[in-house]
Amino acid sequence: MTTLTRERAGTDSTDERQQQSSGGEKAFLSVTHAVLVFWSIIVIGPMLWTLMTSFKSTREIFASPFSLPDGLHLENYANAWTDAGIGKYFLNTVLVVGSALVLVMVLGAMCAYVLARFEFPGSKAVYYLMLAGLTFPVFLAIVPLFFTLRNLGLLNTLPGLSLTYVAFALPFTVFFLFAFFKTLPYEISEAASLDGAGEWATFFLVMLPMARNGFASVAIFNFLGLWNQFLIPVAINTNVDNYVLSQGMAYFASQAGYAVDFGALFAAVVITVTPVLIVYIIFQRQLQGSVSQGTMK
Amino acid sequence: MTATVTQPLPGGDTVPTRRRRAGRWTFDRISFLVVFLGVPLAIYLVLVVSPFVQAVYYSMTDWTGFSPTQNFVGLANFEKVFTDDIFLKSMRNNIVLAILLPIVTITLSFALASLLTVGGTMKGQTRGLKGSGFYRTVSFFPYVIPAIVIAIMWQQIYDPSNGLLNGILVALGFDMFESFPWLGDERTAMAATIFVIVWSMVGFYMVLFVAAIKDIPAEIFEAARIDGAGRFRIATTITMPLIRDNVQTAWIYLGILALDAFVYMAGLNPGGGPNNSTLVMAQQLFTTAFTKGQFGLACAMGVVLAAVTLLFAALVFGVNRLLGGKDAR
């Protein structure tokens, strides 16, 4: 393909129209780049502005949106971390998201494996039940969920929140790991069982390691989804001490209108974004790669 | 719970699949299946499935949550929902969002994706644009930022007196925007809100479309170009129809997002905006349940929300099929 077109471009048979449009070509290319650069500025600009503003004192913020900070007001970060409770929320988020992520990946992999590799009456029904969970809006469930957790004594507790995260992330996890387990060759699990491995050993020592690529993508998406989760904690985790970052941010922002520590608000935004930024930079190739696989069913 | 797992097993014994060691229901295997399927399923049934089912039942009661009894009131809640002007207004806002958000986001991300893939030189082989990796990485980033943080960030950018937007506009000489409340004016609140959601979503769909366009065989573009089709023509009559399934997926995802939109609204305009111009059903539901304690009524709103969502998805599938798309993938 490449050689073919190169040859053609080199020979006299090159289309005259194409040669003529070469000036237009250049113009179009520069317009294209201009559009893309403009869009990139729209995307990055607000973030850089937020970063810059997070180093300004509240007085400076009121003075002008553009002025550079007169020094690095790192006390904004200290204030956000301690006074506004962002540090506490951060810790809560790490605990809840961390435990939920581990649990949902283990349980999701187990469930997906059984559904993908074993056929038994009802296995299809379970699979469709999982799919249904992906379709319905969480809002429909939110009120009964509140009372279910209250009856279980898990309302307003971190374990309760974590378990709820697991339950709501499960359909997505099962759905995608199902596809990965489906594609693994049967010969290998048969070989494992001939070598005397039981079902448990086959899963943990043979199948799970083989599915690790898919496993990683799903884990990244789950991490982002759970870290960014807002509705579930707002509804079922109403004790301020147990707040996670997303709801803590909303709480802080709604108070900032009165308390007016805007510097700390911007600092809090930066603190919240930093972990996802790190994950994004490390895994961005993998993330972008799985977008197309992930959305095509 | 366990019943659903163990019951089918003896049946499975009699119809062994070729691939399995037929019918060896050893302790190892049974314990494996019970634990592997039972534990996740139990959590899922208790915390996801049962609340969904309960919500449908509660939507027909006058439950206030804390009273031990509740009366079955039939469809009275739905009647109340559909005669409540504020809820109807929020529903209208959701529908406006569900129409505009996908159109704007898909158009913009498709245009950017086209520029990145076939926007390069028209000579020779289809080449991506130089630096397309950079543009992709930058545009995708907002997708991973927590939506609530995006909303709060933009709330500050839209701030009438200290915000970035008015700062830029005034610097450019538009003095009438000196303290224009973008989110506080009924005329602009919704548009400003839509822009924020579009901003956060374009990168994701751009990456999705870029991947889809790259799957189209280069010969097709080559042929179109030899036939003299221009870039715009290629994008609209060749690329778009060939990636229609991805576009359909995008419509559905964005529509579902638009019919929810709770997070963005909670960050930008928690109170529903000027004259409820950005109030959405989800906010109304949340207030009805957790502020007013009218749980039966809130569940009815949830049922309406779910029904509208499913209707929307069905509509997208239907339209795509009518326009000649592949179906039943």
Image (cartoon, rainbow, N blue to C red):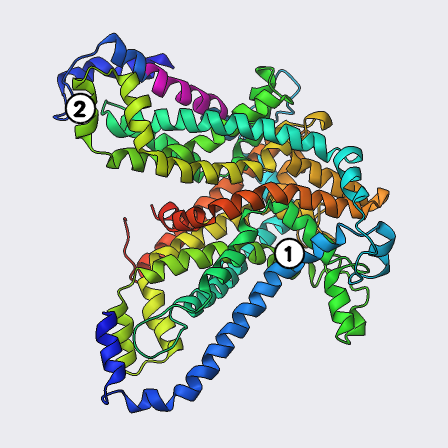
Check disc 2 and report its element: helix, strand or loop.
helix
Q: Which mark is residue B193?
A: 1
Q: Which x, y percent locates residue A137?
A: 50, 39
Q: Nearer the viewer, residue A89 or A216?
A: A216
Name above or below for residue A247 compared with residue B46.
Answer: below
Q: Quadrant of residue B293?
A: top right
Q: Chain of mark 1?
A: B
Q: The magenta stretch spans which residues?
A: B34-48
Relative to A279, say whether A67 is above or below. Answer: below
Q: Gap between marks 2 and 1, in whole Å?
A: 56 Å
Q: Residue furthest left?
A: B18
Amino acid carrying mark 1 in the image: Thr
So how many labels did they put on this image? 2
Q: Is residue B43 magenta?
A: yes
Q: Residue at x 66, y 33 (%)?
A: A90
* Magenta stretch, main secondary structure class: helix
Asked whether B177 falls inside the magenta stretch, the response is no
Residue beneath label 2, please?
A: A190
Q: Amino acid at mark 2?
A: Glu
